[in-house]
C-alpha cells in the first residue's frame, strides 16, 4: 500500500484509452494479418510447408485482433464510448468468428463472478470442488475428466467453441435480442467474407489457408484466458464470503511471458490488472503493472510453469487450493 492509495485507485489512472496507440496497434495487427494471409495464398503452389510457416505470423495477428475485440467488448479500446468500440469490435468479430455482444455478455459475467463458487460457468471452464466431483455420478465424473483434459480442452473444445458454438447462443437460455442480432450479424458477415474469398481463390485454397490459422488462434485464445486462473492457491469463495477485489488480484495471475510474447498476445498476460480494472486498454497494462509494486503482488506464473498448472482441475475447499486429478486419486483412496 502506497500511503492510503489502493491498487484500484492506482490502476484507474491508466483507464484512459489513447486514439493514437489504439489505431497504431489495430493498424499493424490488421496489416500483418492481411499480408500474412495474402502470402499464404501466394505460397500454396510452392509448398504447403511454407504456408504453414507463414500461418504462424497470421495466427499472431489473429490473436492480437481478438484481444483488441476483447477490449472493444469492455468499451475500453477507443476513447469514445458507444458505437466506435462496437463498430470496431463487430468488424473484428467477423475476422475472429466472435459475435461481439454474445461473447462480450458472457465475458462480462465472468468478470462479475470469477472465483465465486455459487456463480460458476459464465465465460469460463467450470471447476468442480472435490466434494462435488466425489458426489457426481460415474459418467459425470468421466465426462468432467475428459472435459478438463488440457489437450482435449485446447485442441478440440476450443475450435468447436469458436467455429460452431458461437454461431448460436448455446450458453444463454433466453438470449436478448441484441445477442441474437450480434450472432446473426456476425454469421452474415462471415458468410459474405468467406464467400468473397472462395469466389476469388476457390474453396480448397481458402480451407488450406484458414484452417491452421483458426485452429491455432482458437487454441491460443482459450489457453490464455484459461491458464491465468489456474494455479494452486487460486481464489474461490462461496457467495457470502466472496469479495470482488480479492477475486481480481488473488484469483487472476500475471503471466510472466517474454516481452515479444506479451506483444503477440495483446498483453492479456497482465490478467490480474485486466480483472482489477477492465477499462484499462491492453496497450496500457504493462505500464500500469510496473507503475507500483502493489500492482505486482498477484501470482506470477512463467510460460513453462503454466503447462503444469493446466492440469489442476478440482478445488479442495478444506485445503483451499486447486489440485490435479492425480492428487485427488491419491488422497481419496481409502486407507488399507
Image: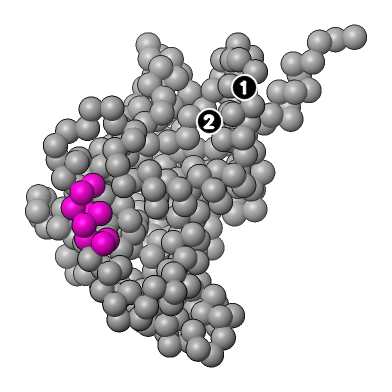
Q: Are marks 2 and 1 in contact (CB under 8 Å)?
A: no
Figure quadrant of the C terminus: top right
Q: Secondary structure at mark 2?
A: loop
Residue 7 part of the magenta-drawn span: no
Give the class, few, some or many, for how many residues have Cα within 10 Å of label 2's Cα (few <14, many ≥20).
Answer: many
Front-most of residues 255 and 120: 120
Q: Nearer the viewer, mark 2 or mark 1?
A: 1
Q: Which residues are magenta?
A: 183-191
Question: Is there any visible trace of residue 70 in the rendered image?
Answer: no
Q: What residue is disc 1 on?
A: 139
Figure quadrant of the N terminus: top left
Residue sitting at 60 percent across and 15 percent down? 137
Vertical side of 317 occupied by 85: above or below? below
Residue 187 part of the magenta-drawn span: yes
Q: Position of residue 167 (x, y in %)?
A: 31, 47
Please state if 194 lies on the left or on the right of 39 as rendered.
Answer: left
Residue sitting at 53 percent across and 58 percent down? 257
Amino acid at each position: 500500500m502506497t500511503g492510503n492509495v489502493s491498487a484500484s485507485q492506482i490502476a484507474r489512472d491508466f483507464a484512459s484509452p489513447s486514439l493514437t496507440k489504439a489505431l497504431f496497434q489495430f493498424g499493424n495487427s490488421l496489416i500483418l494479418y492481411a499480408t500474412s494471409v495474402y502470402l499464404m495464398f501466394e505460397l500454396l503452389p510452392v509448398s504447403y510447408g511454407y504456408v504453414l510457416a507463414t500461418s504462424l505470423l497470421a495466427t499472431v495477428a489473429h490473436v492480437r485482433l481478438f484481444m483488441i475485440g476483447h477490449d472493444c467488448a469492455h468499451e475500453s479500446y477507443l476513447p469514445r464510448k458507444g458505437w466506435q468500440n462496437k463498430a470496431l469490435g463487430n468488424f473484428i468479430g467477423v475476422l475472429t468468428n466472435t459475435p461481439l455482444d454474445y461473447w462480450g455478455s458472457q465475458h462480462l459475467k465472468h468478470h462479475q463472478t470469477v472465483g465465486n463458487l455459487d456463480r460458476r460457468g459464465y465465460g469460463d471452464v467450470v471447476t468442480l470442488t472435490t466434494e462435488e466431483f466425489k458426489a457426481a455420478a460415474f459418467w459425470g465424473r468421466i465426462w468432467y475428466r475428459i472435459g478438463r483434459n488440457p489437450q482435449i480442452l485446447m485442441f478440440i473444445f476450443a475450435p468447436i467453441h469458436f467455429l460452431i458454438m458461437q454461431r448460436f447462443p448455446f450458453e444463454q437460455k433466453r438470449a436478448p435480442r441484441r445477442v441474437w442480432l450480434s450472432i446473426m450479424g456476425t454469421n452474415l458477415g462471415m458468410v459474405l467474407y468467406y464467400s468473397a474469398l472462395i469466389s476469388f481463390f476457390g474453396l480448397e485454397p481458402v480451407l488450406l489457408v484458414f484452417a491452421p490459422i483458426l485452429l491455432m488462434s482458437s487454441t491460443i485464445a482459450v489457453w490464455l484466458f484459461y491458464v491465468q486462473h489456474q494455479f494452486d492457491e487460486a481464489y474461490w469463495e462461496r457467495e457470502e464470503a466472496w469479495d470482488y477485489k480479492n477475486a481480481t488480484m488473488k484469483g487472476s495471475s500475471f503471466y510472466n511471458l517474454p516481452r515479444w510474447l506479451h506483444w503477440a498476445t495483446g498483453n492479456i498476460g497482465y490478467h490480474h490488472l485486466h480483472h482489477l480494472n477492465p477499462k484499462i486498454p491492453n496497450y496500457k497494462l504493462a505500464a500500469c503493472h510496473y507503475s507500483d509494486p502493489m500492482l505486482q503482488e498477484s501470482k506470477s506464473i512463467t510460460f513453462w510453469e503454466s503447462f503444469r498448472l493446466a492440469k489442476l482441475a478440482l478445488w479442495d475447499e478444506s485445503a483451499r487450493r486447486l489440485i490435479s486429478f492425480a492428487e485427488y486419486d491419491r488422497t481419496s483412496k481409502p486407507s488399507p
